[in-house]
Amino acid sequence: MNKGWAIVTGASSGIGMAYARELSRRGFPVLAVARRRERLDELARESSSRGGMLETFVADLTTESGLRSVVSRAAELGEVELLVNNAGMANGGDFLGVSLEQEIRAVRLNIEAVVTLTHEILEGMVRRKRGAIVNLASVVAFQPFPHFAVYAATKAFVLSFTESLAEEIKGTGVKVVALCPGSVRTEIDMFAHNEGLLGKLPSLTADEVVQAGLDTVDRGGVVKVVGWLNRFLPLMGRFLPRSTVRWLMGVSAKPPRPLIADRAGI
């Protein structure tokens, strides 16, 4: 990739912060988007001390105004070489135990923001015949996940959407990747800390996820499941009845108390 701008959403922690750091280290000018200004300012100071260029942009992508402000700033930047749709929200708990408002916010962030930013930025990439988009999906995108029903469904959308786009723009020089990690060790990780079987599985680091994503872009891959153990999850749907898959996923995670967490990754 050339060194046009890289835009990273959800850059104030976890995978998003790791992406922003790594891309800045590689010489990309980075637009780091998140809600928490103090975290972004700290990231900008760190990048500057290493000779990098990182611009902070505070926006809430669950709102129309926040989303449109990012679209507007992206247009002002000019050439965007890489878009990382990382910001995500997971509501833990049974569907009826979480407020409808929070579930709708998750749909807006995990789906609407991804579709909007991809649409607005992909057009310029195709016109220039270069660029890449990384969409954070999940290993749970391959099967239903009771107790995290809306989250899993939104990630299934991201996976299908990304694969469809990859086929549509084949031959344009633009790459689109669905990155599917499993549990990732971040400051808020209700999957890694789940009291059921899910919480006993090995967790990835944010840096491992970032490296896998960038390697996949370099190779021209479309779907990347991160973590050797996580590769077994997509296989379940091929060899087991869907009723069995639903049961296995349901018992692998102990139903958490209603909990709202900003996430991107698993």
Image (cartoon, helix red, strand yellow):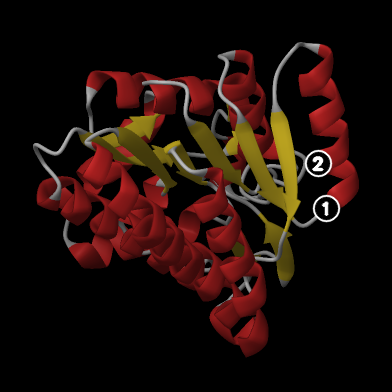
Assign a secondary structure to mark 1: loop
Q: Residue at x 68, y 64 (%)?
A: 256
Indicate left or right for 203 with 39 as reference.
Answer: left
| 30 vs 257, nearest the viewer | 30
Residue receiving disc 2: 40
User: Looking at the figure, which quarter contains the N terminus?
Assistant: top left
The answer to whether any part of residue 186 appears in the image is no
Q: Residue 265: give its label.
A: none
Image coordinates for residue 139, horizontal then vertical, percent: 39, 45
Image coordinates for residue 178, horizontal then vertical, percent: 33, 43
Indicate left or right for 42 with 223 as reference.
Answer: right
The answer to whether any part of residue 173 appears in the image is yes
Label 2: how many Cα within 10 Å (few below 14, some 14–19, many 20+): many
Determine contact: label 2, label 1, CB under 8 Å: yes
Indicate left or right for 220 with 212 as reference.
Answer: left
| 79 vs 88, nearest the viewer | 79
Instruction: Tell me how far mark 2 sits from mark 1, CA to CA.
Output: 6 Å
Indicate left or right for 168 with 185 as reference.
Answer: left
Q: Residue at x 27, y 33 (%)?
A: 130
Assign a secondary structure to mark 2: helix
Q: Residue at x 20, y 53 (%)?
A: 165
Name the amino acid type tagged 1: Arg
Image coordinates for residue 115, horizontal then vertical, percent: 39, 64
Name the amino acid type tagged 2: Leu
Image coordinates for residue 100, horizontal then vertical, percent: 61, 88
Examine the image and state in which quarter residue 131 appears.
top left
Q: Residue at x 19, y 46 (%)?
A: 166
Residue 124 lies, with reference to residue 63, above or below; the image says above
| 77 vs 197, nearest the viewer | 77
Residue receiving disc 1: 36
